[in-house]
Every structure is written in structure tokens, then in C-alpha cells.
Amino acid sequence: AQSVTQLDSQVPVFEEAPVELRCNYSSSVSVYLFWYVQYPNQGLQLLLKYLSGSTLVKGINGFEAEFNKSQTSFHLRKPSVHISDTAEYFCAVSARGGSYIPTFGRGTSLIVHP
Amino acid sequence: EAQVTQNPRYLITVTGKKLTVTCSQNMNHEYMSWYRQDPGLGLRQIYYSMNVEVTDKGDVPEGYKVSRKEKRNFPLILESPSPNQTSLYFCASTYSSGANVLTFGAGSRLTVL
């Protein structure tokens, strides 16, 4: 079984500042890692994913994440945020092979202030 | 357009009045799932289905039923809703093999009085 911990429930930041949303996971097997974003009053959509290869993954809207196997982390970063980045961000993990059942973290609310 | 469609999007009902939230996908996905989203608790899985006639409980199945008679549809049934089932519900689907991305519906906000 896998588990996901998003270390911050809320992250306030000013516009144009950098931001990092933290995600740690635990699993007894190799995993795939995802970040989803939920804009206000909408469903979740994929921001980026790590499957294999380069540990630095780039996603939509200027976001990127780095997979760190030794620290079992998959932190999300953006060098300069916009007001429109205000949203809920979810980290998720699924096991390689076997049944596909993803596990989600509790989410981090990113609040961008002008 | 590839999508997951949920209905109704908003519903206010009363305790004990049976209701069904429908979910339909047009991508021929094998895997479908229901989640509820509550403040501070994130997304919690209610039920999932790996294929037609194959369903299983998630983390919070109490008070809910599902069925998967057709590949495209996965309705969520609340036989006797209670106020603690007031929540935002999401249906999602994907292919069951490989590292596949979930496609989510727009959500159904349910209030039980």
C-alpha cells in the first residue's frame, strides 16, 4: 500500500514570488507520481507526472517537480506565481504494475495575493 | 470531446430520500472511481470499479452503493442519505493498465438536510 503526505495544508504567497508545495510518499514498491490541480469550482486536472527517466518533470503553466527517490519526495515548484495559480493542489501516487488504485494526499491550498 | 459527465451538479435533498448521482465517460476506460472531497480531508475514495461487473470498496464506502453494468456508466447510489454525506463528489476514470492519468468529472455538490 502507498501513502502520501502533503506537508502544508495552506501556502499563502505574493504574486511573482516563488513557491514550493511539498509532497512525501511511502511505498513498498516502485511508484508513479502525479500532481493534480483543482481550480475553484472545477474538477481536478493533471498538472504533471513522473513515470521514469529524468527526475525533473515539467508540467503546464510553468510548474515543475523533482522526484527524489532517496527522500521519497516529489515537491512541486514554480519560480514566479500568478493570481490565476490560486487553487488546490493534490499529490498522488500509484504503484507500478498490479492493480491501478491511486492514492491522493490531502491537498495544499495555494493562495496567491496581489 | 473526451470527458467524464456527472449529474446532477448540484442537489439539495432531505434525510432518507434515495438519490442517484450518475457518471458517464466516453473514453472506453476500464477503471472508474468515486471520491468525496471534504474540507481538511482531501479526496477520499468511496468505491471503484476495475471493469464491468467488478466493483470494490474504497476508504469510505459506508452509506453508498455502486453498480457497473455498462463500461461507460458508474452511478453512485445513496439509499438513505444522511447529513454527514453532505459533500462534493467526483467521478473519475482511466485505463486500467500502465501509468494512466485520471480524468475527473466537474463534481456534484450534494447537501442533505
Image (cartoon, coloured by chain):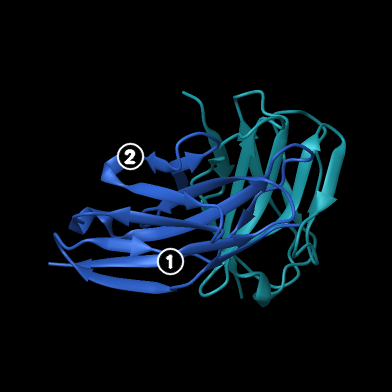
Chain colours: A blue, B cyan
* Structural crowding at the residue carrying mark 2, measured as other residues with C-alpha within 10 Å and reported as few (<14), some (14–19) or many (≥20): few
Residue in the image at 40% along x and 43% along y: A56
Q: Is residue B50 above or below residue A92?
A: above
Q: At which x and y percent is residue A29?
A: 73, 49
Label 2: chain letter: A
* Three-letter amino acid code of the residue under disc 1: Thr
Q: Which residue is mark 1?
A: A108
Label 1: chain letter: A
Picture mark count: 2
User: Which quarter of the image is occupied by the N terminus of chain A?
Assistant: bottom right
* Three-letter amino acid code of the residue under disc 2: Ile
Q: At which x and y percent is residue B9?
A: 51, 51
Q: Is residue A18 above or below residue B74?
A: below
- Taking the view exactly as shown, the residue that stands out farthest to the front is A70
Q: Is residue B9 above or below residue B44?
A: above
Residue B18, picture quadrant:
bottom right
Q: Can you see residue B88?
A: yes
Residue in the image at 48% along x and 49% along y: A67
Of residue B8 and residue A28, the one placed in the foreground of this image is A28
Residue in the image at 44% along x and 73% along y: A9
Residue B86, picture quadrant:
bottom right
Q: Which residue is mark 2?
A: A60
Distance from Cα at disc 2 to Cα at disc 1? 18 Å
Q: In the rendered structure, find residue B113 and report the number of the disc placed on it.
A: none
User: Which quarter of the image is occupied by the C terminus of chain A?
Assistant: bottom left
